[in-house]
Image (cartoon, rainbow, N blue to C red):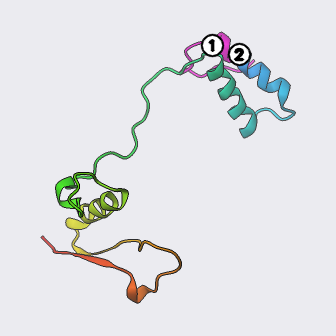
Amino acid sequence: MSKTPDNVANPSLYAKAKSKAKAKFDVYPSAYANAYMVKEYKKMGGKYKGAKKAEGGEIKGFDAKKSDLDKDGKISRYERKRGEAIARNMSQGGSVEMQARGCGAIMNAKRKTTRVPRG
């Protein structure tokens, strides 16, 4: 029998889920069988130890007040994306290209660019 991972909180429950996956799938280990095993383990009440890895986060220099274009107090997805792109490129300077909204293709000559001063 193979070793259970260190981050499994309940090894006996994990073993039950693993045997269930081995019985269901002809090929084990496989991506489908492992996904099924994790799903069953969690369904049975199993948990994993350790902290979740954080992804993303706030962009340094992003100012929500300046990014609120329509001044309604709420930041839309477009306003956040635009503000983060500007903040990300402020240190580099140059221009920022934003995805045009609407249907169909946008010609490169018509694509909106936001100029960011160097500094």
Can you tell which mark lies on residue 11?
1
Extent of the magenta region: 1-15
The N terminus appears in which quarter of the rendering? Answer: top right
Q: Is residue 30 visible?
A: no
Q: Are marks 2 and 1 in contact (CB under 8 Å)?
A: yes
Rendering quarter of residue 113:
bottom left
Q: Which residue is mark 2?
A: 15
Q: Secondary structure at mark 1?
A: helix
Classified by dominant secondary structure, the portion drawn in magenta counts as: loop
Q: Is residue 117 magenta?
A: no
Q: Secondary structure at mark 2?
A: helix
User: Which residue reaches farthest left?
Assistant: 119
78 left or right of 42 in image: left
Q: Residues within 10 Å of mark 2 (few under 14, many from 20)?
A: some
The kind of residue tagged 2 is: Ala
Number of residue marks: 2
Rendering quarter of residue 112:
bottom left
Q: Residue at x 39, y 86 (%)?
A: 110
48 left or right of 43 in image: left
User: Which residue reaches farthest right?
Assistant: 26
Q: Residue at x 64, y 19 (%)?
A: 4
Please determine whether, in this image, residue 72 is positioned above or below residue 30: below
- The picture places residue 72, in percent across and down from the top left corner, at 23, 55
- The picture places residue 13, in percent across and down from the top left corner, at 66, 13
Residue nearest the viewer, comparing 101 with 4: 101
Rendering quarter of residue 33:
top right
The kind of residue tagged 1 is: Pro
Q: Is residue 47 visible?
A: yes
Residue nearest the viewer, comparing 59 with 43: 43
